[in-house]
Image (tube, rainbow, N blue to C red):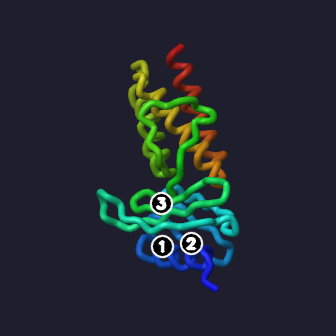
Amino acid sequence: MNTVQDRARALITQWVQSHPQAALYDEANGTILDVPSGKAVRPAWRDLTALEEKIHPETKENYLVFLFEDGTQIALVDPGGIAFAPSTENSGPVENLPPVVCLRDFLTLKQRIDHYLYQHGGEAPPRECLDLILICIATLDGARAVGFDIGDLEGELEQSLSELERRQG
């Protein structure tokens, strides 16, 4: 019988073979490795209700969207890896927060935050630095909601936030 889970397995396998720089799939234990971050997630495949194969309007690359019973979604995208909705549970409303993010976004923004904090030591960090931290918080909360273990990334962001608070007095 061809279930949505069987179709998902086949599409993931095919997709990661042509996008190994974005994600890898371990069919034996059902995990997907987000290559840009090195983090793996094991979705609740038994709760998968639908999947869609779409074409990105800008890159014209195909990507996969997986929808689960609890309303969560993940997507396999290139570039990016595993994409998901951010969560404003802890950040509150965030200006310029995109509807879909990935851990690659977090890593890029974290570099910008650290640049402001550590490459311009004598200057007060701009307001943008706090905005970027809020986007990072929402990104990590979204990552946790889809099953990523992001404790180490939270610790790194906490250090940046502490430095920002120290520098702003």
> Which residue appears at 58% of the width and 41% of the height?
87
Residue type at mark 1: give it: Val
Q: Position of residue 153 (x, y in %)?
A: 59, 45
* Mark 1–mark 2 distance (CA, rounded to whole Å): 7 Å
Circle 3 residues within 10 Å: few <14, some 14–19, many ≥20:
many
Q: Which mark is residue 25?
A: 2
* Nearer to us in this view, 48 or 118: 48
Identify the element where label 3 is drawn: strand
Tell me whether the residue at label 1 lies in contact with that at label 2, contact meaning CB atoms closer than 8 angstroms. yes
Q: Earlier in the sequence, mark 2 or mark 3?
A: 2
Residue furthest to the top in view is 169
Residue type at mark 2: give it: Tyr
Q: From the viewer's perspective, tell me whether residue 81 is left or right of residue 73.
A: left
Identify the element where label 1 is drawn: helix
Q: From the viewer's perspective, tell me whether residue 105 is left or right of residue 162.
A: left
Q: Position of residue 58 (x, y in %)?
A: 29, 57
Tell me whether the residue at label 2 lies in contact with that at label 3, contact meaning CB atoms closer than 8 angstroms. no
Above or below, comparing residue 116 to residue 143 in the picture: above
Q: Which mark is residue 81?
A: 3
> Which residue appears at 50% of the width and 76% of the height?
11
> Which residue appears at 55% of the width and 59% of the height?
38
Residue type at mark 3: give it: Gly
Q: From the viewer's perspective, tell me whether residue 103 is left or right of residue 4.
A: left
Identify the element where label 2 is drawn: strand
* Mark 2–mark 3 distance (CA, rounded to whole Å): 11 Å
Can you identify the residue that label 1 sits on?
16
> Which residue appears at 42% of the width and 70% of the height?
19
Q: Earlier in the sequence, mark 1 or mark 2?
A: 1
Q: Quadrant of the N terminus?
A: bottom right
Residue 135 seen: yes
Circle 2 residues within 10 Å: few <14, some 14–19, many ≥20:
many
